[in-house]
Amino acid sequence: MNFRFPRDVAVFRPYLHFANVHNRRRLFSWYVKHFRTTSQARSSLSGGGSSSSNSQGNAFLVPGATVATLLMLGVLHARRLYDDKKVEEAREKGIEFEFRPDVKASFLRILPLRSISRAWGFLMSVDIPVWLRPHVYRAWARAFHSNLEEAALPLEEYASLRDFFVRTLKEGCRPINPNPYSLVSPVDGTILRFGKLNGAGAMIDQVKGFSYSVSSLLGASPLLSMLAEKNTEDDGSTIEQESTQREQSKKSWWRVSLASPKVRETISECPMKGLYYCVIYLKPGDYHRIHSPVDWNVLVRRHFSGRLFPVNERATRTIRNLYVENERVVLEGLWQQGFMAIAAVGATNIGSIELFIEPELRTNRPRKKLIPSEPPEEHLYEPKGVGVMLKKGDEVAAFNMGSTVVLVFQAPTSNSPKNNDASEFEFSIRRGDKIRVGEALGVWHA
């Protein structure tokens, strides 16, 4: 005879309770094991095509560095929205911000910004799990308006945020203006200032109410001294002033490097040349590589190991000598119209400025002195008098995150301001314009 017992019989309840607990534990153990296996399989599958993107360890655990990065992105995005709103409101009203130091600028001077930037650079170099990379980079693109369609590689192949920042673009995304009588933008960014300089000792406006000199930005450049000497001769200056400048320039190796007839001839062939400048600000979402604006010969590199203040809109109107005090790399040389210099200015959280024509250069290195008073480090490119030849549009350097580029160059000009000479260099930009690599900053006619 078969006996049937109802399921709720009291005598079997302890056994049934034990069986339910045991089954739940087995189910939970199976779920965890299945989740680990699936995550690891997804990581190995996604990273199989990239030799530099294999992340070790548990794939479903997000590194603390990635969490810190996401939080920083949120803070930067909120601050950018606030600053952009204030700037746009001021532009609509026709208001130009004046220089006005504040408490924040004084506070920044006591912070270890160089150490903070090195720490940030380390975080940016930490590998992100392969499955998380597209989400992080898309979040960055939404926050800072980056165009991911231009990236040369799939998002999964950028192992870290640093690799993503200095990414290359697809071929054809930045066509170079083919006009041989044009000077093109070396970067993607926003036009802050531009204009003509009255000699090598002229001042560049940082913001309304404060300026800095060209020589303080580029350093003691013997080539600029030669330009000033030539201008003095053209204006009919005395022989004593002329000899003094020559004596000062004789102390530099530059006189030796520029002693070849080829370089002398280049300067003398173009007697009517004016000195111009252009300041371009790169936002964090911009393309971060620097390209050559013209065909030219880079003769010298000068590295200033300075501070690392931020270089955003607020910083330019609150920090004195911002571009002069910040760490920067200056390239100087000659092009068909005379003098050419590019100053790549570093900023907070930019741990390095990479120079493609000199890969061994290291910026933002630890210093023993707290006061940034050491002279700039100079490097003369070989062969002397020729240096490194760059073509228009060639890659020159790269920033981590956003920063600023200052161009100082000679171009054709006229004697009289009333003379509308067609051969005079003219800017084709306006303040506040968004510009991209390869687009013309200005043109002239032969």
Image: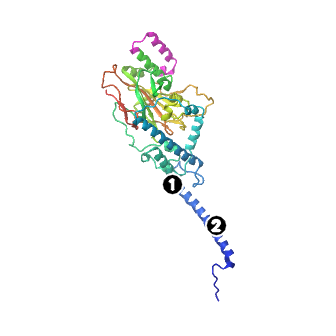
Q: Which of the numbered marks, if any, corresponds to residue 25? A: 2
Circle 2: element type:
helix
**How was the colour assigned to the protein in this rendering?**
rainbow
Q: Is residue 97 visible?
A: yes
For the C terminus, which image quadrant?
top left
Task: Examine the rendered structure and indicate whether residue 5 appears above or below residue 115.
Answer: below
Circle 1: element type:
helix
As drawn, which residue projects farthest toward the bottom?
Answer: 1
The residue sitting at 53% across, 57% down in the picture is: 42
Q: How many marks?
A: 2
The residue sitting at 40% across, 27% down in the picture is: 195
Q: Is residue 297 magenta?
A: no
Real-space CA distance between mark 2 and mark 1, rounded to the nearest whole angstrom: 32 Å
Residue 434 left/right relative to 38: left
Task: Examine the rendered structure and indicate whether residue 14 appears above or below residue 34.
Answer: below
* Label 2 neighbour load within 10 Å: few <14, some 14-19, many 20+: few
Give, as a three-letter code, the residue at label 1: Ser
Disc with the residue nearer the chain's start (2 vs 1): 2
In x, y percent, where is residue 295? 40, 31
Residue 405 left/right relative to 269: right
The residue sitting at 69% across, 74% down in the picture is: 14
Q: Which residues are magenta?
A: 233-258
In x, y percent, where is residue 203? 45, 23
Q: Is residue 166 visible?
A: no
Task: Examine the rendered structure and indicate whether residue 18 appears above or below residue 299.
Answer: below
Q: Which of the numbered marks, if any, corresponds to residue 46? A: 1
For the N terminus, which image quadrant?
bottom right
Q: Quadrant of residue 2?
A: bottom right
Give, as a three-letter code, the residue at label 2: Arg
Which of labels 2 and 1 is toward the front?
2
Task: Examine the rendered structure and indicate whether residue 68 appears above or below residue 111.
Answer: below
